[in-house]
């Protein structure tokens, strides 16, 4: 959080220093972003079991402090998650749980966006910063196996953390129309670095559940 505050404060100072520059100071817009998300874990007896498709949409805001640099923020509504397999107990049966996590959250990104000068009709950009996500809803689809029997279940989850912090890295291209509207497409990697699980394993209470969510998204956005 301190790094984010330092980044924000630095951007505000730079905006003040360049207040008389002759370029558009603010851009606002909307984005839509299909995703591929997964969970990684280093907890004993837990394993990641692949990715799932997700989606995000949101509001974009850019504060330009030079012609080629801006502070980008806004909010993103995220629908993603992942899959974990681990030992579990259901009723009195000990077996293996395969759980698909379905997470809905709202993310506030704080990033630095750096553009090239126009190359033909396009400008290319790189982006780096941090994101803070707040959990809105968590559900699980469960497949529990013991012996030769398997049954499916699911429902709301109470062992998912409310807060998630992440590193955001992206790149892409923009095309500005004559009227000043900008269309853009970018690829972004969102790397979670805080544990999103809060419980302990039902079979072995000495094992702390631990997982981190990552996703790659394709951003399509329009700025006005």
Image (spheres, rainbow, N blue to C red):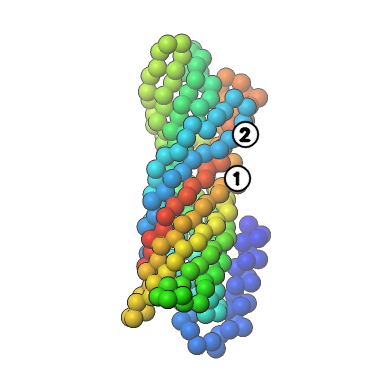
**Dot 2 corresponds to which residue?**
42
Viewer-nearest of discs 2 and 1: 2
In the image, residue 139 above or below residue 72: above
Residue 84 pos. (x, y %): 50, 31
Front-lying residue, 115 or 48:
115
Front-lying residue, 184 or 158:
184
Residue 14 pos. (x, y %): 61, 78
| Residue 85: mark | none
Quarter that holds the N terminus: bottom right
Q: Quick one: SS at disc 2? A: loop
Query: Residue 57: which quarter of the image?
Result: bottom left
**Dot 1 corresponds to which residue?**
194
Residue 203 in sight here? yes
Residue 166 pos. (x, y %): 57, 51
Query: Furthest-front residue in view?
Result: 120
In the image, residue 74 above or below residue 198: below
- Count the labels in the image: 2
Residue at image position (62%, 23%) is 205
Q: In the displayed structure, does residue 126 sit left or right of residue 177?
A: right
> Could you classify mark 1 by the number of other residues whose Cα lies within 10 Å: few (under 14), some (14-19), or many (20 or more)?
some
Residue 101 pos. (x, y %): 45, 36
Rounded to the nearest angstrom, the CA distance separating label 2 from label 1 is 13 Å
Quarter that holds the C terminus: bottom left
> Could you classify mark 2 by the number of other residues whose Cα lies within 10 Å: few (under 14), some (14-19), or many (20 or more)?
few
Residue at image position (51%, 27%) is 85
Residue at image position (53%, 25%) is 86
Residue at image position (65%, 66%) is 6
In the image, residue 45 above or below residue 15: above
Query: Residue 120: which quarter of the image?
Result: bottom left
The earlier-in-sequence mark between 2 and 1 is 2
Q: Quick one: SS at disc 1? A: loop
Q: In the displayed structure, does residue 61 sit left or right of residue 4?
A: left
């Amino acid at each position: 959080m301190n790094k984010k505050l330092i980044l924000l404060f630095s951007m505000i100072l730079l905006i003040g220093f360049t207040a008389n520059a002759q370029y558009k100071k603010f851009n606002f817009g909307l984005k839509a972003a299909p995703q591929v998300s997964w969970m990684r874990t280093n907890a004993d007896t837990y394993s990641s079991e692949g990715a799932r498709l997700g989606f995000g949409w949101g509001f974009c805001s850019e504060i330009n402090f030079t012609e080629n640099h801006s502070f980008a923020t806004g909010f993103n509504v995220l629908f993603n998650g992942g899959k974990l397999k681990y030992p579990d107990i259901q009723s009195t049966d000990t077996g293996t749980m395969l759980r698909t996590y379905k997470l809905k959250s709202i993310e506030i990104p704080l990033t630095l966006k750096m553009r090239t000068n126009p190359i033909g009709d396009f400008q290319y950009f790189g982006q780096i910063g941090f994101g803070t996500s707040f959990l809105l809803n968590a559900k699980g689809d469960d497949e529990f196996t013991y012996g030769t029997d398997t049954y499916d279940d699911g429902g709301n989850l109470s062992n998912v953390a409310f807060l998630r912090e992440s590193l955001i890295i992206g790149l892409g291209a923009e095309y500005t129309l004559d009227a000043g509207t900008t269309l853009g497409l970018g690829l972004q990697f969102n790397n979670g670095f805080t544990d999103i699980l809060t419980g302990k394993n039902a079979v072995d209470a000495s094992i702390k559940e631990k997982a981190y969510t990552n996703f790659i998204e394709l951003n399509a956005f329009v700025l006005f």
